[in-house]
Amino acid sequence: MPRRNRVTPFGEIVATPERGLLMGNRGVLCDASGAIVRAWQVRRWIACRTDFRGRWRPAVTPGRWTALYFLDEATALAAGHRPCGECRYDDHRRFTAAFGAAHGVAERRVDAVDRILHLDRLDDRRDKRTYVATVAELPDGAMVEVDGTASLVRAGALWRWTPGGYGAPREAPGGELVVLTPRSVVAAIAAGYAPALHPSAGG
């Protein structure tokens, strides 16, 4: 049985055999048995490389670490994570610069970025916060909900998300759609941050 540690664009943690291109964390999510008992613990949600300087640690270390996995960076951003400042230093700098340009935050003030992002990813009930927009209003790399499933916005089309990759592009419907990527992150993408995509998204 696959471990429950894969994150969807809805921010949900599910069990699926695919691992994806990135890993990350939201604090300690597991109890002593290794079972996930909370959706998040800390405000700093990050997305990391799966391989960095030969380091290795168990996927679950109760009391210290709970690894999470994402199909790609667009998925991680939609779920409310941002690039790690250590293993993804260059991406982190590009993201905080774009985020800062969009929101008036000094580039190196990552705590301010995390505060804004945390307010933007969860509503008052601690459910995922969303908003509505048309595809024409969204940059490539944003994620939307269509008929209960997540889709990537890319080149004016929608690419259906699955744990193993994206389906073939299809024409975007007219009108407003529910946007899964936090509004503040969409603004950072629009300001120049280009999230890395799974190869199934066409490059």
Image: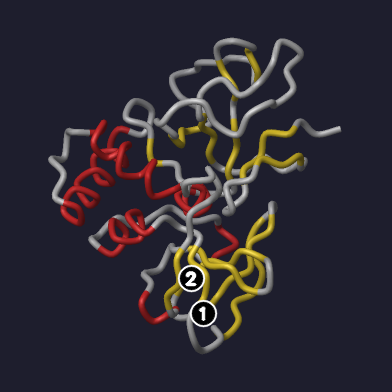
Residue depicted at 51% across the width and 26% down the height: 41
**Total tally of numbered discs in the picture:** 2
- Name the residue beneath numbered marker 1: 157
**Quarter containing the N terminus:** top right
The answer to which of 30 and 166 lies nearer the viewer is 30
Looking at numbered disc 1 in the image, what kind of residue is underneath it?
Answer: Ala
Circle 2 — which element?
strand
Q: How is the image coloured?
A: secondary structure
- Name the residue beneath numbered marker 2: 153
Q: Which image quadrant is residue 116 in?
A: top left
Residue depicted at 25% across the width and 60% down the height: 192
Above/below status of 104 relative to 33: below
Left or right side of 154 for 87: left
Q: Position of residue 49 (x, y in %)?
A: 47, 33
Q: Which image quadrant is residue 52 in?
A: top left
Q: Position of residue 74 (x, y in %)?
A: 48, 54
Pointers 2 and 1 in contact (CB under 8 A)?
Answer: yes
Left or right side of 142 for 68: right
